[in-house]
Amino acid sequence: MRIRDSRLEPSFDLESVEIELHGGPVAGVDEAGRGPWAGPVVAAAVVLDPARLPSGVDDSKALDEDRREVVYGRIVEAADCAVGIADVERIDRDNILNATLWAMAQAVAGLRTVPRLAIVDGNRAPRLACATRTIVKGDAKCLSIAAASIVAKVTRDRLMTELARRHPGYGFERHKGYGTPEHKDALARLGVSPQHRRSFRPVQLALGLTPPR
């Protein structure tokens, strides 16, 4: 990992060692949208080309929206990328963890190349046909996971902006479905939309299905 602004920056070191010792390809896998009250959870899988590493890749949380869009363009131009999207119905039926793991598996299955290894952000990995390794805070350590975090985040943000046009008044284009005061006020004012996760407590409160604590 490189150091920038007194902070560790993700590097391609782990992937390089894996490729040298065991061969590739190596895919990074991450998700966006586990915590929001509304909208899908989106997972991305990215296989970077060691000869064409895109510049500016970092943990998506370390980049502002404009910068993420720029780097997203570089990633999709230079790498093999795929996404998996678990909608609200699946989240409510299977729970958010299982929906996230399903979306990750869909993303890996959508790659043009079959990875030998998938390195997954966090401590839970989906069931895949290839080997897997989990890395806590991997988006801040491994370049492939950081790239996947950007692809997942930009994809989901674009989806939420589109949902804002279909469901005006909630502010999805601004808070992206997360639990902000604006979102809470909109729920009280407009009620629950089809894009709200009914398995989440704040939405159940809005529906009157759960008594306040």
Image (tube, rainbow, N blue to C red):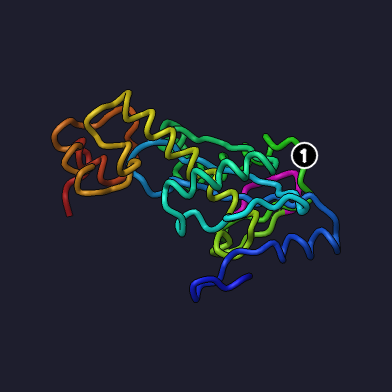
Near mark 1 (Cα within 10 A), the count class, few <14, some 14-19 or many ≥20, is some
* Magenta part of the chain: 124-131
Near-viewer residue (151 or 131): 151
Residue depicted at x 20% and y 37%: 187
* 116 part of magenta stretch: no
Residue furthest to the left: 189
Q: Name the image quarter holding the C terminus.
A: bottom left
Residue 179 spot, x, y in % from top left: 28, 48
Position of 159 with respect to 145 (left or right) is left
Residue 16 figure quarter: bottom right
Residue matched to label 1: 113
Observer-nearest residue: 117 or 129?
117
x then y, percent, for residue 172: 31, 37
Query: Hey, which residue is sitting farthest bottom in the picture?
Result: 6
The quadrant the N terminus occupies is bottom right
The percent position of residue 90, horizontal first and vertical second, equals 47, 34
Amino acid type for the residue under numbered disc 1: Thr
Which SS type dominates the magenta stretch?
A: loop
User: In the rendered view, does 148 fall on the left or right side of 168?
Assistant: right
